[in-house]
Image: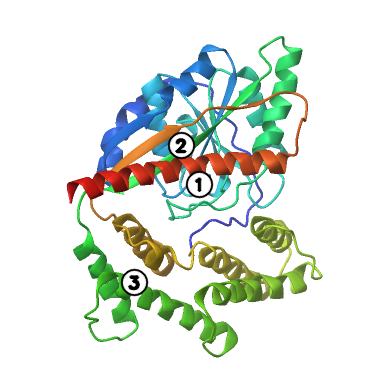
Amino acid sequence: MHNIVVAKPYRFVPPYKGKVWATLVQHWLPSYLRRAYGIESVEFRGIAHLQASLSANLAVALTPNHCRPCDPMVMGLVSKNIGRPFYYMASWHLFMQGRFQAWLINRAGAFSVYREGLDREAIRASAGILTEGYRPLVLFPEGVITRTNDLLRPFMEGIFIIARAAAKERTKLKKPATVAVHPVAVKYFLLTNVEASLHEVLDEIEARFTWREQALPLVDRIVKVGQALLALKELEYFGSVQRDEIAPRLEALIEHLLGRLEAKWLNGKRQPTFIGRVKALRRALLEEMIAGDIAPEEREARWRDLADIYLAGQISCYPPDYVRGKPTPERLAETVERFEEDLTDKARIHGRWRVIIQIGEAIGIGPEKNGADERLTEQLQAQVQAMIDQINRESESVRSATR
């Protein structure tokens, strides 16, 4: 389990206002991304939309999809391209993984947000950044790394609450009131054949199962390993392998994991969204753990419950037909990466990658609430998905033409 839950009192890490370190990090990013993540080339699209908002002195929020761990650094390449530093809202646990990492990401523009509750300091800091308006603010509305570049998780609504608060303050300061919320599509493509590398990972996973070597095509092998991993968890939690299609089996396991804990910790109360359910449960579990007034046995039991919540989140990141429905090289790589990460907390890099970053036209947010935040959030998600789909169609046409 990744160390994303921290049982310590939360301390807000504010934005660092200096520009020197952010500029230095930008120059280091291309070589680091090439070495650490295999990012070989980058294409920027729609930069003119962003530059138009900045030229009009509008406050700017950028809202990319979040499919790979390197997404914030890839967005740093956009910052380098336009010659203006960005701020990034980042989960607090990233600041708790060593002093140097905390220092570096803060100097590069990141500030913390506490994912287990309502972080008013992070909201105020975000609204303050947009009120000032000099630096664009990067927010990842999916809230998690999905490893499904073609499909989005539901976006969270907080972006428009922050934008509207900033628009009100900008009106008081006689600045252009509009906050320009730009949808951003980040799309990765493999440049090299990684089939042998993926088979190598599957060899290691199957060895854990004590299986003999599987002489199967890559797609069938991935599907078989995925079914085995699901069956193992069903045996663990239900006592038997369930007899149904994959989608309802995944839903049933998630419901079992979360529903039991909601009954135990929240008197059965259930939030309307998956992210809301997870946050409510973590908050209930962590309050006394942070205070430190529980016995060691109880603390250990709560960590087991937190591990079940984490497992539910990991299961939710496996779309049922993601591989069989459209077995592109990228989807195959993403799924194997997810397998390896879930089993070992690490995922090796396969091959060399090209990334396309497309910035869409802004959704203008003023001080008045002219519509439901839910509708605006759905509009924003639809625009990001549409850009990803368009990039995919263009790529498929190129691939077809070169066959």
Q: Please indicate whether residue 335 sits to the left or right of residue 55 in the image.
A: left
Residue at image position (44%, 20%) is 48
The reply to whether discs 1 and 2 touch (Cβ–Cβ < 8 Å) is yes
Q: Secondary structure at mark 1?
A: helix
Q: Position of residue 231 (x, y in %)?
A: 47, 82
Q: Position of residue 295 (x, y in %)?
A: 70, 71
Identity, as a three-letter code, of the amino acid under mark 3: Ile
* Mark 2 neighbour class, 10 Å CA radius: few under 14, some 14 to 19, many 20 or more: some
In this rendered view, identify the residue nearer to me: 285 or 314. Answer: 314
Tell me the quarter of the picture where residue 175 sits: top right
Identity, as a three-letter code, of the amino acid under mark 1: Leu
Label 2 – label 3 distance at C-alpha = 35 Å
Identity, as a three-letter code, of the amino acid under mark 2: Ile
Q: Position of residue 100 (x, y in %)?
A: 42, 40
Q: Which residue is mark 1?
A: 94
In this rendered view, identify the residue nearer to me: 386 or 284. Answer: 386
Residue 11 in sight from this viewpoint? no
Q: Which residue is mark 2?
A: 105
Q: Which residue is mark 3?
A: 222
Label 1 – label 2 distance at C-alpha = 9 Å
In this rendered view, identify the residue nearer to me: 204 or 45. Answer: 45
Furthest residue toward top = 174
Q: Nearer the viewer, mark 2 or mark 3?
A: 3
Q: Secondary structure at mark 3?
A: helix
* Mark 1 neighbour class, 10 Å CA radius: few under 14, some 14 to 19, many 20 or more: some
Tell me which label, 2 or 3, sits earlier in the chain: 2
Tell me which label, 1 or 3, sits earlier in the chain: 1
Furthest residue toward bottom = 240
Tell me which label, 1 or 2, sits earlier in the chain: 1
Q: Secondary structure at mark 2?
A: helix
Residue at image position (59%, 55%) is 6
As drawn, 67 above or below 326: above
